[in-house]
């Protein structure tokens, strides 16, 4: 098995009807994405533009989020949309069109962030507020967009593919993510899952990673969990909670 951080990470099956649990490849990554977006929006909203260090750190997180979003769009286009349209032509056309709009919005947000970074003190507060409001609109649009994917796209995938086929598709997608990208996913995904799903994820990591690599992931995630959450994760990982 690969030692890559997320190679074996598979969201638990979820229920799309009372009697039919199915594999849901959107569930976990969208939780990570919603958390990353929400945290970044809050950070940009409280940005101290009079403090260059705080301003630059906040804008760096924003740019990391926008990179994450670009990668996520590419993964969905290349893997999920291709799979949908292979068996239902034009089935992904609506969401694909929204992806084009999202890329345009990302370019606009990058431009506004660069303008804020270079702005004189007198104009910085107004530019920061404009960036915050436009980022809020982007986040709101993406939240609605992800709901469509989790409902309509999943319905098409479940109709056209078996769970075994969907797991294989998911694994090919994950294998395309470089190690640094997988670590970023782990940072935002692990803390956002319920303890039972967190235990599944860390169990897969434990089976496929050297102990020191797993400890590095846990160390990265620990500050983002409360005490009870950390105890449960440490137990699932087989490490001492006080380590």
Image (cartoon, rainbow, N blue to C red):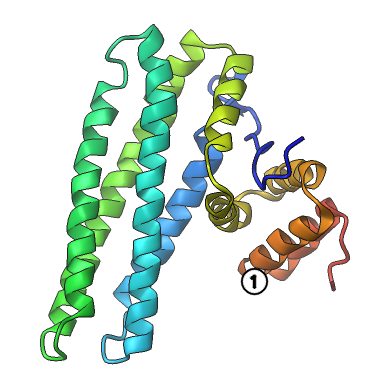
**Image quadrant in which you'd find residue 44:** bottom left
Rendered view: 41 above or below 35: below
Residue at left offset 31%, top offset 16%: 91
Along the line of sight, the residue nearer the viewer: 114 or 237: 114
Q: Quadrant of the N terminus?
A: top right
Q: Is residue 118 above or below residue 50?
A: above
Q: Would you place residue 191 above or below residue 7 in this image? A: below
Residue furthest toward the left? Answer: 123
Q: Residue at x 40, y 32 (%)?
A: 76
Residue 219 lies left or right of residue 132; in this view the side is right
> Residue at 21% of width from left, 71% of height from top?
114
Res. 134 visible in picture: no
Residue 208 percent across, percent down from the top left: 77, 42
Residue that label 1 marks: 223
Query: Which quadrant, please, contains the C terminus?
Result: bottom right
Residue 21 placed where, x, y %? 62, 21
Query: In terms of depth relative to the viewer, which is nearer, 207 or 27?
Result: 207
Displayed quadrant of residue 123: bottom left
Residue 78, percent across and down? 39, 28
Above or below for 84 versus 234: above
Q: For the image shown, how many numbered marks are present on the structure?
A: 1
Q: Secondary structure at mark 1?
A: helix
Residue 31, given in percent of the width and then of the height, sits at 50, 47
User: Crowding at label 1, few (<14), some or many (≥20) Cα neighbours within 10 Å?
Assistant: few
Residue 188 visible within the image:
yes
Q: Residue at the location (65% across, 63% down)?
A: 221
């Amino acid at each position: 098995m690969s030692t890559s951080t997320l190679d074996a990470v598979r969201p638990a099956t979820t229920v799309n009807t009372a009697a039919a649990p199915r594999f849901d490849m959107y569930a976990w990554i969208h939780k990570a994405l919603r958390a990353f977006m929400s945290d970044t929006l809050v950070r940009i909203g409280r940005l101290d533009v009079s403090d260059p260090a705080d301003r630059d750190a906040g804008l760096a997180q924003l740019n990391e989020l926008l990179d994450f979003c670009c990668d996520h769009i590419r993964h969905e286009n290349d893997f999920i949309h291709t799979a949908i349209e292979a068996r239902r032509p034009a089935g992904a056309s609506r969401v694909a069109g929204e992806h084009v709009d999202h890329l345009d919005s990302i370019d606009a947000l990058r431009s506004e962030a660069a303008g804020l970074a270079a702005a004189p003190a007198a104009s910085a507060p107004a530019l920061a507020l404009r960036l915050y409001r436009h980022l809020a609109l982007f986040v709101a649009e993406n939240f609605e967009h992800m709901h469509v994917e989790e409902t309509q796209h999943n319905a098409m995938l479940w109709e056209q593919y078996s769970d075994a086929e969907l797991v294989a598709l998911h694994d090919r997608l994950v294998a395309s993510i470089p190690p640094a990208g997988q670590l970023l996913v782990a940072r935002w995904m692990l803390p956002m899952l319920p303890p039972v799903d967190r235990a599944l994820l860390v169990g897969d990591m434990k089976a496929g990673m050297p102990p020191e690599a797993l400890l590095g992931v846990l160390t990265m995630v620990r500050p983002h969990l409360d005490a009870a959450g950390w105890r449960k994760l440490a137990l699932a990982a087989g490490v001492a909670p006080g380590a």
